[in-house]
Structures are given as C-alpha cells and as structure tokens.
Amino acid sequence: AEQPQAPAVSSTGTRGSAMKLVYGAIAFAGCHAVDERPITKVVKLLQGMKTQLEAEAKKDEETYHNLACWCETNDKAKTEAIKVADSRITDLVAATEEGAAYAAQLEVELGQHHKEVDQGKQALAQARSQREQAADEWYSTEKDLVQSIAALKNAIQVLSKQHGGESLLHVSKVLRFVMDRRADSFAGLSQQQHSTLTQFLQQPASAGSYNSRSGEIFGILRSMLEEMEKDLEEGRTSETQDKQQYQEMKISKTEENDAGKKAIATKQQELASTREKLENNKEDLDDTRAALAADTKFLSDLKLWCQSTD
C-alpha cells in the first residue's frame, strides 16, 4: 500500500535551546570584555554560531511549513479521490445491473425472434407443400374433366345424328369411361335418371329399347355435360384464386422472415455491444474499488503521520 512520504524534519527544540545559550553568552561577553582580545574571539565565534543557528531555524520553519502544506494538500486530494470513487462505484453498480438486465432482455427477444422466424419458415414450407399437392390434384381433376367433357360432347354429337345400336353402344362406352374418371358427376342426377342410366348400361347393345330411350339418354348426357363444364370453370377459377392467395401469403411470410432475420442480426450486435460494455463496467468497478481501498488506507495513515509531526 502507498505510504505517506513527507519532507524530512529536523529537531527545532534543541536548536532553539542552543540559540538561547548563544544569545546569553553574547550579551554576557559584550558587557564584561570590551577590549579583551580573547573575549572578542569568543564573541565573534558566538555571533557566527548565532548566525548559523538563525539560518537553520529559518530552514526548519520552511520545512515545517512545507510539511504542513504537504499534509493538507494530500489530505484534500485523497479525500476528493475517495468522494469521486464512491460516486463512481455507485454509478458503475447501477450501470452493471442495468446492463445485465438489458442483456437478459435482449436474449429473450432474440429467442422470440428465432422462434418466429422458424415458425414462419415452417408455415411457408407447409403452405408450399399444400399448394403443390392441391395443384397436382387439380391437374388430375382438370385432365379428367377435359377428357370427360370431350367424350360427352362426342357422344352427344353421335347420338344427335344416329339413333341406332351403334350410336347407343358408343354412348354406353362414353358413360362407362366417365364413370371411371368422374363418378361424382352422376351425383346431381335424379333417382329416375340414375335408374334409366343403370338399365341402359345393363342392357346389351342390340336391345330394341335403346331407340325408345335415346331421347332420355340424350337429355342426361347434356345435363352431365353442363355440370362438368360448370365444375371445370369453377375449378379453374378456384385454382387461380388459390395460386394468387399462395403467392400473396408467400410474399408476406418472406417479408416477415426477412424482417425477423434483420432483427436477429441487429439484436445480436446490440447484445455483443452490451456484453462488452458490461464486462468493461465490471472491470472498472473492480479497479475503482481497489483504488478506493488504497486511497482510504493512505488517508488514514496520512492523518496519523501528520498528527505525529505536529
């Protein structure tokens, strides 16, 4: 620990007593030996001693003054240093606690940002998978509808021109073809129409009843065609809307994810800066406390030392 180092101080008490003796001797010699040569020598010697003692006394006085000034200066300096250190420690403790709390807050916010970005990625991946699956399903459905519609149009055209067994046989094949691909197309038919189609498909192509029922079959085919064309139009409209909604969702989620990633980068930089500042404050706090302890001890030793020299 730092120890007070003051100017050296000589003993002024002994020197003061010596000066009194010299003054007395000079006065005695001056009164009793005006013309005696040996006495004159003594007087001169004593006067020289007086001059030396006065010079040393003046030097001691200056030294004492310097010592008093040194004690006062160091006392004020260390007292002020202790005051500044106390204030600095208070500020550093507050800054350290605030920094630790802010770092913890940033860690929580970073965790939340990571979670949101991960959820956004998962939502986007799930939406993409669902869109691809829906597109594949619609592609298959559209293909069946287009083929079924083409087959029904052909069957209607054939039936409208011919009413013989060959035309009805062709219609029977078309119906079976449609049933294999679009069984739900028959759901809108009435019970009577279902019964008619069932009997029609079960009878051999040469059956004479074909001719009597060709008009009824023709009507069923047109009804089925209209229903399929409606389904195709609605399906295409729905597919277009679904694609648009997916693109809008994709853009929105991508922007959210990008914003989340940017927030993560910003928070990570801020967290690193906060941690660095926190470590610096902790180190500064330790150094300030050590300096305070040293200054406190120095001031205590200084007061004791200066009191002992009074």
Image (tube, rainbow, N blue to C red):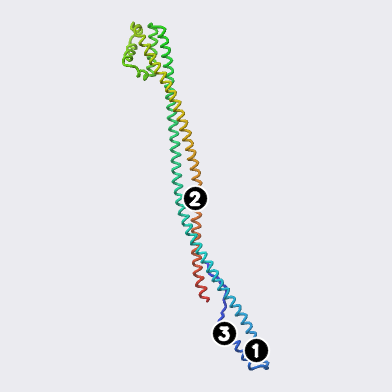
* CA–CA distance in space, label 3 to label 2: 70 Å
Q: Please, what is the three-letter code of the amino acid marked with disc 2?
A: Thr
Disc number placed over residue 43 in the picture, else none: 1
Label 2, residues with CA under 10 Å away: few <14, some 14-19, many ≥20: some
- Residue at which label 3 appears: 17
**Element under label 2?**
helix
Place of residue 268 in the rendered image (x, y in percent of width and height, measured from the top left): 49, 45
Mark 3, secondary structure of its residue: helix
Residue at the image position 61 percent from the left and 79 percent from the top: 58
What is the three-letter code of the residue carrying label 1?
Val
Q: Residue at x 40, y 6 (%)?
A: 162
Q: Quadrant of residue 138?
A: top left
Mark 2 — residue? 274
The structure residue drawn at horizontal position 47% and vertical position 35%, both measured from the top left corner, is 252
Report the Cα–Cα distance between label 3 and label 1: 18 Å
Which secondary structure lies at badge 1?
helix
